[in-house]
Image (cartoon, rainbow, N blue to C red):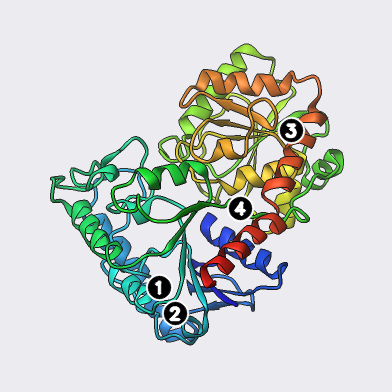
């Protein structure tokens, strides 16, 4: 049984990390699985690419940039991810595709698989699994839906595109997808129950087979460490209550909900003596705009080493995320694996991982006040070790490489037999 995992990139984004982890998880079950990407950023020798030589790599990079430019010309200045697949490449004749028994698609946008190239893959007649890391496959182009429900109809009148009408570009691509999906079937995998529910409510794919299997995490790498030693390694205070948060570009970043975190910290400063509280942020790039915080804040910058990243999670007392729309965020899973509880809004796939007042705190959606209440709950918790242990145990039971790999192995076997 040969499985080919297909993704746009390696190491860049949540889908890439999820695909790479699944690829390794399957090997634990003696399944021959390979990961191939459209554009390869890293140097991992086992990750293959459709752009293997300098000329094809330059061509691929050009297509990525060209699609981004063409897409922006059709969109309003909204901070909502949206793809219009005008251009791409056909991969159905590639040796790795021909040799595979099952094709497993992940995130395939940005100059990679168009509707036509996807049709050529499906026409091969091989079993195809497609993991939905966002909403693109069942919408007219948006990756993040927020409160828009046009995907339940036929898209159109899109709040993101210019000249929005009932027959705008979102509806046109909805029709192209509808035409494709009426001809071919494939197995859908959603990492979260939230995403699975959205697919079942969609007008495009509500009659397709849907299975919810979470992304995997290497629990041997992301694991609890001695907090004092971890903080010493990072140069952090051993005595403070440390709150950790991820990538923070600006106050106006809609998807990450940074403004709600800032408001929650303002409330925290009013309600609690924060002289022994510190916010630590990782993922910020040099020169990136950083908002003013009402509590002491340290920036660790971009971290590209998973072992160091695990140390960062393990050093913290809690992890904070104000994401407004997320499938199954890796940061939440990584934090829990390291025994660090998570404070989050109750949104997306987060409730699949964060059990309220057991492995963290689920605040009311977009309520900065309740988010602040969650932080205070963690600060004042009488048994933090119990929270740490519960967070870790949840990951071992449901999200380990062994557990997730087995569920995928069973799925593949059922498709072949």
| Spatial separation of the CA atoms under disc 3 and disc 4 | 20 Å
Tag 2 or tag 3, which sits nearer the N-term?
Answer: 2
Q: Which residue is mark 4?
A: 302
Between the C-alphas of marks 4 and 1, the distance is 23 Å
Q: Which mark is residue 57?
A: 2
- The residues bearing labels 3 and 2 have C-alpha atoms spaced at a distance of 43 Å
Residue 288 position, x and y percent, is 50, 46
Measure how far apart labels 2 and 4 are at the Cα level.
25 Å
Disc sitting over residue 317 in the figure: 3
Of tags 4 and 1, the one toward the viewer is: 1
* Looking at the image, residue 403 lies above or below residue 89: above
Please state if 246 lies on the left or on the right of 116 as rendered.
right
Asked if the residue at tag 2 contacts the one at tag 1, i.e. Cβ–Cβ closer than 8 Å, the answer is yes
Q: Categorize mark 2 by other alpha carbons within 10 Å: few (<14), some (14-19), many (20+).
A: some
As drawn, 395 above or below 205: above
Q: Which residue is mark 1?
A: 61
């Amino acid at each position: 049984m040969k499985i080919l995992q297909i993704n746009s990139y390696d190491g860049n984004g949540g889908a890439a990390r999820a695909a790479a982890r699944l690829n390794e998880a399957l090997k634990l079950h003696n399944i021959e699985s390979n990961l191939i990407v459209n554009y390869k950023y890293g140097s991992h020798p086992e990750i293959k690419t459709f752009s293997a030589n300098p000329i094809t790599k330059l061509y691929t990079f050009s297509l990525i940039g060209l699609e981004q430019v063409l897409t922006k010309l059709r969109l309003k200045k909204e901070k909502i991810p949206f793809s219009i697949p005008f251009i791409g490449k056909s991969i159905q004749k590639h040796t790795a595709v021909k040799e595979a028994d099952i094709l497993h698609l992940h995130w395939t946008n940005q100059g990679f698989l168009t509707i036509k190239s996807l049709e050529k893959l499906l026409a091969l007649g091989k079993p195809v699994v497609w993991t939905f890391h966002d909403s693109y496959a069942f919408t007219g182009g948006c990756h993040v839906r927020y409160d828009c429900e046009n995907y339940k109809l036929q898209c159109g009148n899109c709040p993101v595109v210019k000249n929005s009408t009932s027959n705008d570009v979102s509806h046109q691509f909805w029709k192209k997808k509808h035409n494709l999906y009426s001809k071919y079937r494939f197995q859908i995998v959603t990492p979260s129950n939230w995403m699975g529910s959205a697919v079942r409510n969609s007008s495009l794919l509500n009659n397709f087979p849907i299975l919810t299997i979470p992304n995997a995490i290497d629990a041997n790498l992301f694991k609890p460490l001695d907090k004092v030693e971890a903080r010493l390694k990072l140069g952090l205070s051993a005595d403070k209550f440390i709150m950790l948060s991820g990538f923070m570009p600006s106050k106006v970043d809609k998807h990450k909900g940074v403004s709600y975190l800032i408001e929650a910290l303002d409330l925290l400063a009013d309600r609690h003596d924060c002289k022994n509280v510190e916010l630590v942020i990782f993922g910020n790039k040099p020169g990136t705009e950083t908002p003013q915080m009402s509590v002491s804040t340290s920036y660790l910058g971009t971290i590209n080493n998973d072992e160091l990243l695990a140390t960062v999670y393990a050093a913290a007392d809690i992890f904070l995320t104000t994401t407004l729309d997320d499938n199954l965020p890796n940061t939440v899973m990584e934090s829990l694996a390291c025994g660090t509880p998570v404070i989050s809004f109750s949104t997306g796939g987060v409730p699949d991982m964060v059990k309220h007042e057991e492995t963290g705190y689920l605040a009311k959606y977009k309520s900065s006040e309740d988010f602040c209440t969650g932080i205070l709950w963690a600060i004042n918790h009488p048994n933090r070790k119990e929270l740490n242990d519960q967070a870790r145990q949840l990951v071992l039971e449901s999200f380990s490489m062994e557990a997730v790999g087995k569920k995928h192995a069973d799925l593949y076997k059922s498709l072949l037999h």
